[in-house]
Image (cartoon, grey):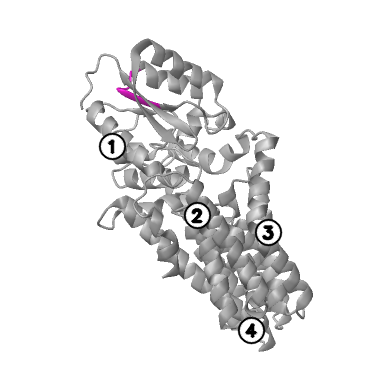
Amino acid sequence: MVAVLLRARDFGNPAIHVDEEYYLLVGDRMLHGTLPYLGIWDRKPVGLFLIFAAIRLIPGDGILVYQLVATLFAAVTAWVVARAGQQLGAGRGGTIAAAICYILWLSLLSGRGGQSPVFYNLFVAGGGLLTLRLPQLATRRDRRAIVINGAAACLLAGLAIQTKYTPVVEGAFFGLAHLWYLRRAGASLFAVGGAAILWAALGLAPTALAVAYYYERGSAVFQAFWFANFVSVGLRRGYPAAKIAARLAGTTTQLAPFALIATLHWRDRPRRAETILACGWLAAALVAFVMIGAFFDHYALPLMVPLAIVAAPVLGRHRAALVATLGWGVALLTFHIVTEPDEGTSARAIARVIKADSGAECPFVFAGDSILYYLAGTCLPTAYAFPSTLAYDAERGASGIDETAEVRRIMTRRPPVVVTMDHPLAPWNLATHAVVARALAQGYRLIMVAPRGADHLLVYLRRDIRRVR
């Protein structure tokens, strides 16, 4: 009920976040035979796109359906958070409060819809809950149970890794914790080594299956997969220091109550083994957060699972902490609701124009929202359909192609409709932007301006096309 109430305002909104728009587009195109990394490009693991493809098999409005499925994932993850809070000694009030905080803070950190952590947090939370059982199992010297427990935890981590690669850090922590407790339970070094091999194999299995699938499809397909998944992220350019600092400041401000509560928990409670494990898990999640270095607010979503779990005992014991934390969350949520514009209305209006004026040709969304292709039901002019890949400087040289040549190829084919923005969401790729600007000046006319946050989406129609109204 809490998950539905907190997230219902976005049900049916096609433009919650640029990332999940693209995940839905990729999942939808997969059902029509498009192969990720070759027919449509991104650097996320294929497991994430398989989730969205599976969601598209559910009858109904694809946008609403993925948001309902994401809400279910959020609610189940919150239930796991509550169960894990019990392992740390929290009472019923504290565990319920921690679960509510998890759901609430998803919305504050750009997890209102179907960001990848909304899905993979469930797998990581499950692995973490199993890891928190280790002190009890070791006390009973139940080595068989620890091996089975570790197998399940590492497999769950493997599923998370195939949704996004950063949970490899949490997965490694779960595996090492299991090895430590297996040894403490009296297992021989030979048995510990065998368990390590088993658990590592299970953690790598989902990714190994993806690698094997693409390898079997031939050298060119495999190279495209390998580059997108394991090479391209290292080629991305950094964001300006001021932008990084602003992102970190915003995320830190929103997570401040949990940092204070975690400190209070550590100082106020006996050092239970479960608490040490939970804090180790939190440290691993922090390492994963720092790894990529872009520091978007939704990169902090995985932190909310261990943070909420560590907070559960304090929230249940100290009413002031409970009131202050939930009060801060409600205040932030109110601020978000008041200040965040409804960009779904603009997206649907532009999509109607694209659908009416494109005919059988492919429009080009140079900057803006990839969901426009999905809403309009049009073909894609390029495999690099996520707008920032070709439009923004941070991606210049990281896609494996000459972005300027690709944009020149697209504009040479004279797409019927071109969508761009008056001000970019990140610094322009000046070379590709110049190609588009020149082509628009020579052969297009502006037919629509729609709000996009503090800026505007600009819709251009080719001059030889008579507009359909």
- Real-space CA distance between mark 2 and mark 4, rounded to the nearest whole angstrom: 35 Å
Judging by the rendered image, the residue that carries numbered circle 1 is: 376
Looking at the image, tell me whether mark 2 or mark 3 is earlier in sequence order: 2
Judging by the rendered image, the residue that carries numbered circle 4 is: 137
Q: Which residues are magenta?
A: 413-419
- As rendered, which of 313 and 432 lies closer to the eye? 313
Q: Is residue 142 above or below residue 20?
A: below
Q: Are marks 4 and 3 in contact (CB under 8 Å)?
A: no
- As rendered, which of 239 and 256 lies closer to the eye? 256
Judging by the rendered image, the residue that carries numbered circle 2 is: 111
Q: Is residue 24 above or below residue 126?
A: above
Q: Are marks 2 and 4 in contact (CB under 8 Å)?
A: no
Judging by the rendered image, the residue that carries numbered circle 3 is: 256
- Real-space CA distance between mark 2 and mark 3, rounded to the nearest whole angstrom: 18 Å
Tell me if I can see residue 79 in this picture: yes
Q: For numbered disc 3, what is the local secondary structure?
A: helix
Camera-nearest label, 2 or 4? 2
Label 4: few (<14), some or many (≥20) within 10 Å?
Answer: some
Q: Is residue 119 above or below residue 14?
A: below
Camera-nearest label, 4 or 1? 1
